[in-house]
Image: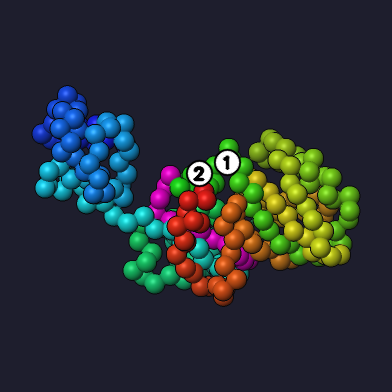
Amino acid sequence: MRLDRFLANLPNYNRQQARMLLAQQRVRVDGQVVSDPLAQVREFSHVALDDAVLQAGYPARYLMLHKPAGCVSATHDPQHPTVLDLLPAEARHGLHIAGRLDFNTTGLMLLTNDGQWSRRLTQPATKLPKHYLVDTEDEIGQHYVAKFLEGFHFAFEGLVTQPAQLHILGPRQARLAIVEGRYHQVKRMFGFYNNKVVKLHRERMGAIALDPALAPGAFRALTAEEIAAV
Ligand code: URA
């Protein structure tokens, strides 16, 4: 929210008074004096007027988790363990998943309490490439490569998938980069050839790669560079 609106929403100040407080350099955001009415205030910001704390803010959190097979990408599930169950109880609060994976898909999963950041990561307009290692039941033909680039018609959504890069690694293994995240997208793409995906592992989302030091089920905080890369 804009800083002037944040101040004008407080019980004691109207818009004009809020602008006056800013012009008088009495407002600090995260310890810095701010006089720009258009400066942004987030739920994470500490905002003070003179010595009074107007909003304490709370820390933004960003985690990468190595999702194992056999757990649900959800915050609650009545039947199965969820990815949040892999975190200590005190670390779970307020987190949501930025880009779900199917029950048996493994690999990079990002969790955060920052909705703006996760929207940037997952919204289709960003076209962030998601890289998967795919193992299939049947052989992957060379002719797949052109079809993945050209796109698949997904009748349910009424769309053609964005160009996807397929690199064949072996008779039944490939690396795939897709810029969308449609429901069961990878399985449906291979399903066009009736070729069942038997293993699916997400290696990377844009500039953020799964840390090879993380065993399945383990997690760590993102570095400042990884957070800024989104
Ligand atoms: N595509 C799929 O089919 N499943 C996933 O988990 C991710 C992408």
- Mark 2 neighbour density, 10 Å: few (under 14) some (14–19) many (20 or more): some
Task: Let me know if residue 82 appears in the view.
Answer: no
Give the secondary structure at mark 1. helix
Left or right of 114: which side holds 193? Answer: right
33 and 200: which is toward the camera: 33
Q: Residue at x 65, y 38 (%)?
A: 157
Residue 188: x, y in percent?
73, 51
Name the residue that disc number 2 marks: 120
Quadrant that contains the N terminus: top left
Between marks 1 and 2, how big is the CA–CA gap?
Answer: 7 Å
Residue type at the position of mark 2: Arg
Q: Does residue 121 show up magenta in the picture?
A: no
Say whether marks 1 and 2 touch (CB < 8 Å): yes
208 and 99: which is toward the camera: 208
Sequence-wise first label, 1 or 2: 2
Q: Residue at x 36, y 70 (%)?
A: 89
Name the residue that disc number 1 marks: 126
Residue 153 placement: quadrant: top right
State the extent of the magenta-drawn residues as a range: 101-116
- Mark 1 neighbour density, 10 Å: few (under 14) some (14–19) many (20 or more): few
